[in-house]
């Protein structure tokens, strides 16, 4: 049997994102024994492992090469290379003149520039993106802002699709 203090200790090394508060929060145990957001009491939260973090007071100009997941709470201007890891741009985060290459990109803040993701891009309701997005899957929440182009075609897709410019059209 785990005590409440044991639960609290095991949650200290985790980042919890509350979908209702739309920010990083801590969890508490409700009277029914469920884990809920300690601020609003919602059970609509998701766990994210501790990652490299660009804090809100930090501003970076240049190139970031990171070999783990990255959370941006501050401002980054330039190229971000994460290989197959996840980039989380928090509601306070800003990425300007971006050239992002990652596995997945989750945008709750502001991004201007180009994004290339091998898995997916998600723009949450509080997020905005302006630029070109290239990824196999994309999710844009109701209320999110996006201006630019989206390319979901992968290299495998190009070989499977017929070239319509060379296809003869039959007239009936």
Image: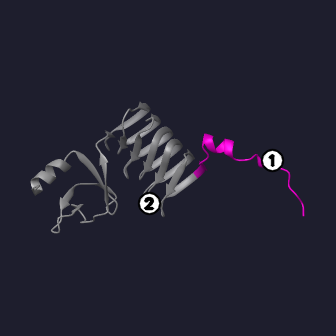
Q: Label 1: which residue?
A: 165
Relative depth, front residue between 53 and 10: 10
- Asked if 27 appears above or below 157 in the picture, the reply is below
Q: CB under 8 Å between callouts 2 and 1? A: no
Q: Quadrant of the N terminus?
A: bottom left
Q: Give 37 or 78, whichever is nearer the viewer.
A: 37
The correct choice, above or below, for 72 with respect to 20 in the image is: above
- Callout 1: 10 Å neighbours few (<14), some, many (20+)? few
Secondary-structure class at tag 1: helix
Identified at 47% across, 54% down, the residue is 123
From the viewer's side, name the closer residue of 144 and 166.
166
Q: Which mark is residue 127?
A: none
Q: Is residue 109 magenta?
A: no
Q: At 49% from the left edge and 45% from the top edge, which residue is drawn?
A: 119
Category of crowding for the residue at label 2, using alpha-carbon neighbours closer than 10 angstroms: few (below 14), some (14–19), many (at least 20): some
Q: Secondary structure at mark 2?
A: loop
Q: Going by the image, does 151 lie left or right of 85?
A: right
Q: Is 52 on the left-hand or right-hand side of 96?
A: left
Which mark identifies residue 125?
Answer: 2
Span highlighted in magenta in the image:
148-172
């Amino acid at each position: 049997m785990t005590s409440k203090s044991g639960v609290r200790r095991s949650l200290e090394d985790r980042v919890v994102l509350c979908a209702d508060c739309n920010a990083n929060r801590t969890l508490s145990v409700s009277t029914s024994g469920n884990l809920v957001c300690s601020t609003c009491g919602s059970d609509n939260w998701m766990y994210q492992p501790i990652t490299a973090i660009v804090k809100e007071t930090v501003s970076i100009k240049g190139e970031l090469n990171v070999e783990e997941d990255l959370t941006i709470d501050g401002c980054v201007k330039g190229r971000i290379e994460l290989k197959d890891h996840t980039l989380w741009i928090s509601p306070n985060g800003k990425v300007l003149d971006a050239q992002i290459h990652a596995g997945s990109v989750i945008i709750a803040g502001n991004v201007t520039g180009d994004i290339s993701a091998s898995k997916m891009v998600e723009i949450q309701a509080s997020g905005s993106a302006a630029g070109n997005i290239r990824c196999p899957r994309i999710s844009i929440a109701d209320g999110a802002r996006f201006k630019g182009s989206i390319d979901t075609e992968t290299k495998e897709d190009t070989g499977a699709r017929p070239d319509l410019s060379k296809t003869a059209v039959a007239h009936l």
